[in-house]
Image (tube, helix red, strand yellow):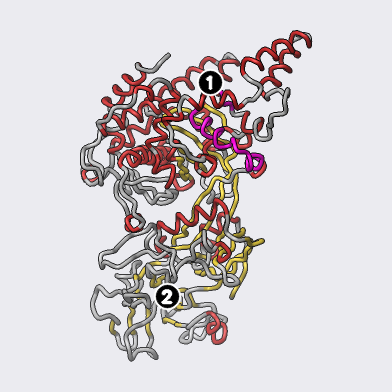
Amino acid sequence: MKEEMTRGRSQVIWRYAPGATFRYNETGGWCLTSSITLSNPTPLTGALANAVSLALRRWKAVGITGYPDPIISPNKYAVGEPYQVSYCIWPTVFTCRRCGRVHFYKDVDKLRQVNDRLGCSNCKDRDLLKQVPYAYVCECGRIDSVFISSQGHHSHHIELVDRGSFQESYWYCKTCGIPLYRNAKEGLGFRSCQCVPRKAKRGILLEDSRVYYTQSIDLVDIEPKAIEPWQDNNRFSDLLLASVLRVPTYSPSHLHDLARWKPTGPELSPELSAMRAMLLQKGMNNTEVDAMINASAQQAGADPWTAYDSDLAQIRDLVDARDWKESRQTVEYVFVRDEPSATAISLDQLIKEASSRDEHGSAERLQDERELASNLGLINLQIVQSLSILLAGIGYTRYYASPRDTDEDGATSATLQPYTLQEGKIPIYVARNTTEALMYELDPWRLAAFLSVNKGSAIPEKAISSDVHLAAWLLSQNRRLIQAGESHLLLRAFEGEEGLTVDETSALVFGVLHTISHVLKATAHRYVGIDADSLAEYLFPAHTAGLLYASTHVEFTLGGIDSVFRSNLKQWLGSARDYAANCSFDPVCSQSGGACLACLYPKFGCGYFNRTVSRSFLFGGKVPGYSAELEGFWSSAVGAAAKRLRAKRSL
């Protein structure tokens, strides 16, 4: 009765990881995954180790009785792709389809030993038993099958009266003609857990999602061949900063062209070499071309970094000095946006292509969509056709899907449980998939106006002199987002224990970005037809940008996001404001924080566990953790302030 199966790697991580219960072929008996074989296991290192460390901190899971510190003890973890799943029948509690009698077995081995044909002891016929679809679960991660707690009835004819819920169902002794419960609310009985403080386990249906929550993290998987040439280049940090700020000198082609460039005397820069070839193709002779190129080289300097130094010198005083190549989100953001292997196509590019083909109707429609996005404070929309995502399963929880500091009893809840050890190491199951995504950025002028209006602070004159200067100033306001990747108005216990304090400015920025992400995800499901559970978010908070991608639950995509981006973006964006303006639980939702399960809390796909999300960030109002009422990012007051800031921009 113990079998092995193979599934897609992402599907295994989400649905069949160790400790998970599932139905065989979706209609058969209930099973429990016992183990997964890892393919070519390696230690936990690099960006994945940092991401796992952050995730474990959120769960307060690192400690003597929990997970080893991934940074200090990477060799205590084994990372690899799952390629084989072992599982067995569970639970081993049955009722007879014919007479209803309950049969209990300690485990699968005992079942195989005494009743491998699943026969009923009362009816004396085989293949009559069906599993009892209930279990006990505890937030500590334990799961147990149900049992009959009443004494003195073990040899009697006991039946399950199944009312469809644990509390309403009960055991009935047919021999005695009485129900086996102390009171009507007891249901199938209580059972205390072995964990401290020995809380009562929760009775639950096996088909209830709360039985098991896979806890995973996503990571943009940058191709090694794209990043390796920069590993030892001491100018990589400057290139990243120039890319983030979009200084005039920067070109996406420089991610390749400058990676291995070294000064070799008279050698031309990549730009001048390309210009020389183009001029020769246009028919100019070598003498004329060389004269022009030499003049350009003398004027601009043979070293291509000279122009970068000139551009960056103008904004150095606005940006904190740091090594940007150590910022993982910065590297990811730049390479997803500009690296050719990601195959990103911008809305501006689609407009240009439509115009070049004289498709004026398409060009006008796309321009209207760009204007609609601008009205929502969104710019630089792109479809990323080849987004490489690494999905990593790090453990599981029961009953609660997200970290909780305390429950109603004052005890720590929702313990992150590691998977079963393999050769003394905690396994981390990974799957690499290529998918598609919508990439967007917040309008820096509207965001600066939002901060100025709500914080009551003036923006330096230098910061509003150009797009580049404003981007540099905003980056300086997002120090917490650069360091931690998130910022919140309400801190959790582990953050307080680490000495973190609320940074309101970066928390407001994060709140706007995170809320818009959830609005776009929700409207994609309701108005465009993309299943909400098949979309996940990936944010670059320090750079006020984000991705909505086809989730790695699946092994392939059908181009749904790409199709919407090209032909139905107006409906998606046009519905965002209307959707976010209302909630079926209003006015209660608005008065209690502006976010709930009916509007902005998705069941899956939020790596921040729905923290710092509120419709008040967009429309204005009260936000938990912020003393004053906010003026929303989409409000007319912020829009007017943004217009005034743009008017001061140098031409």
Mark 1 packing: few (<14 Cα in 10 Å), some, or many (20+)? Answer: some
Residue under pointer 2: 144
Q: Quadrant of the N terminus?
A: bottom right
Element carrying mark 1: helix
Q: Is residue 242 magenta?
A: yes
Q: Amino acid at mark 1?
A: Ile
Location of residue 140 with respect to 333 vertically, above or below: below
Q: Quadrant of residue 54?
A: bottom left
User: Is residue 20 at all visible to an observer of this figure?
Assistant: no
Residue under pointer 1: 351
Q: Which residues are magenta?
A: 226-251
User: Is residue 536 at all visible to an observer of this figure?
Assistant: yes
Q: Could you tell me how far apart the alpha carbons at marks 1 and 2 are, in whole angstroms? A: 59 Å
Q: Is residue 356 left or right of residue 373?
A: right
Q: Quadrant of residue 617?
A: top left
Query: Going 53% across and 73% down the picture, which residue do you hit?
Result: 89
Q: Quadrant of the C terminus?
A: top left
Q: Amino acid at mark 2?
A: Asp
Query: Going 32% across and 89% down the picture, which residue do you hit?
Result: 151
273, 445: nearer the viewer: 273
Element carrying mark 2: strand
Give coordinates of residue 415: x percent, y percent. Answer: 40, 65
439, 149: nearer the viewer: 439
Q: Earlier in the sequence, mark 1 or mark 2?
A: 2
Give coordinates of residue 13: x percent, y percent. Answer: 54, 58
Give coordinates of residue 474: x percent, y percent. Answer: 39, 32
Q: Is residue 415 left or right of residue 617?
A: right
Location of residue 578 with respect to 393 vertically, above or below: above
Location of residue 236 with respect to 458 vertically, above or below: below
- How many marks overall? 2
Q: Quadrant of residue 462?
A: top left
Q: Is residue 40 magenta?
A: no
